């Protein structure tokens, strides 16, 4: 039987990570020393000073990753049609800047989870989560790469149930170790996503037993994806989350954790989505996925600089930019 993240024909590479100049250098001694220095700085420096120096680092990062900058502008043009050139340039810079804020907060907190008390969180829609949990069904907290998704599972940690966080291991062991330390410090259970289907079987069992799984659904990993309409154009999204919900008869809760200010976040739990059945397998997946995408469009449009997608996302753009 094919599992939600495995088509059964052959093994595939993980395509979740964006390629960049720094990705190519991340395992060199110099880069590891620089990254270790950054991690050390987040342990001792205040966040306001890290943000101040981070603005300069962002400019340097952009200069060495022009291909990613161009891809971001193309994505923004899909999200905000008619965006003027100057606004597009500034907004693309904003994506790199907000991603720097995400990393700074993430690693600042990873040294001591008690630092989370310094942050302000406004939680909207908690009743949606409580209602879903009381149903006895499995619950999928479905996020996009928007804002600081790592913090959502920490602040929504439940008293009676653990949140099982599905993640694609980062190719940088230093970055992944800090994320992992933060998750385990607050009792979150990790489930690494790997090719072969074993992770999917574990997730299916957790959900069938009424458990809670948190995952992101806006990037292909080992999933070939399915084409759906996204901001008026065709784009590929993974089938796995919807197939998992259908197989386990689980409730899907779209969750968003945007940055709202300095040490300030909002956690938004959207209205529960119940998967529709009765069509062919492909139609079922596409119909349910389109419902999810419609909700994502609302929040990505609201927070375009916090949707951290550094590669061309739409199929037409992938083909066009690949030729340049």
Image (cartoon, grey):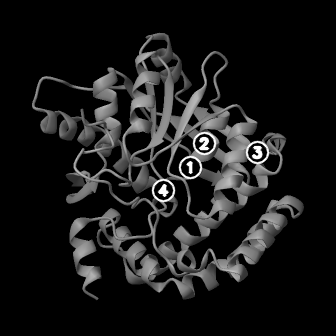
Disc 4 and disc 1 in contact, CB within 8 angstroms: yes
Spot occupied by residue 287 in the image (x, y as percentages of width and height): 19, 37
Q: CA distance from mark 2 to mark 1?
A: 6 Å
- As helix, strand or loop, the secondary structure at mark 1 comes to loop
Spot occupied by residue 200 in the image (x, y as percentages of width and height): 39, 35
Q: Which of the two discs, 4 and 2, labels the residue nearer the N terminus?
A: 2
What mark, if any, has residue 266 been given in the picture?
2
Specify whether 111 is left or right of 189: right
Q: Which of the two discs, 3 and 1, labels the residue nearer the N terminus?
A: 3
Disc 3 and disc 1 in contact, CB within 8 angstroms: no
Dot 4 crowding, Cα within 10 Å, few <14, some 14–19, many 20+: some
What mark, if any, has residue 303 been given in the picture?
4
Residue at figure coordinates x 73%, y 56% from the top left? 107
Quarter of the image where the N terminus is located:
top left
Q: Is residue 198 visible?
A: yes
Residue at figure coordinates x 37%, y 60% from the top left? 13
């Amino acid at each position: 039987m094919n599992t939600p993240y495995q088509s059964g024909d052959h093994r595939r590479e993980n395509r979740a990570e964006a390629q960049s100049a720094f990705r190519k250098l991340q395992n060199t001694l110099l880069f590891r020393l620089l990254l270790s220095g950054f991690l050390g700085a987040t342990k001792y420096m205040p966040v306001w000073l890290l943000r101040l120096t981070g603005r300069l680092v962002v400019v340097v990062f952009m200069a060495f990753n022009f291909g990613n900058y161009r891809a971001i502008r193309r994505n923004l043009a899909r999200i905000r049609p008619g965006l003027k050139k100057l606004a597009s340039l500034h907004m693309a810079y904003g994506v790199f800047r907000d991603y720097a804020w995400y990393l700074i907060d993430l690693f600042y907190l990873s040294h001591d989870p008690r630092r989370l008390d310094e942050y302000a969180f406004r939680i909207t829609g908690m009743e949606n989560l409580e209602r879903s949990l009381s149903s006895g069904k499995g619950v999928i907290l479905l996020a996009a790469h928007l804002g600081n998704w790592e913090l959502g599972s920490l602040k929504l940690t439940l008293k009676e149930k653990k949140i099982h966080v599905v993640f694609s291991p980062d190719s940088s062991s230093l970055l992944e170790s800090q994320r992992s330390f933060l998750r385990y410090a607050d009792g979150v259970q990790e489930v690494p996503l790997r090719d072969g289907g074993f992770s999917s079987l574990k997730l299916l069992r957790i959900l069938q037993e009424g458990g809670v799984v948190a995952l992101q659904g806006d990037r292909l990993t080992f999933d070939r994806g399915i084409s759906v309409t996204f901001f008026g154009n065709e784009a590929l999204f993974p089938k796995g989350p919807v197939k998992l919900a259908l197989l386990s008869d689980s409730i899907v809760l779209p969750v968003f954790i945007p940055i709202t200010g300095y040490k300030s976040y909002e956690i938004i739990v959207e209205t529960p989505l119940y998967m529709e059945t009765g069509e062919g397998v492909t139609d079922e997946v596409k119909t349910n996925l389109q419902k999810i995408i419609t909700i994502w469009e609302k929040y990505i449009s609201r927070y375009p600089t916090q949707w951290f997608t550094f590669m061309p996302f739409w199929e037409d753009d992938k083909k066009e930019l690949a030729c340049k």
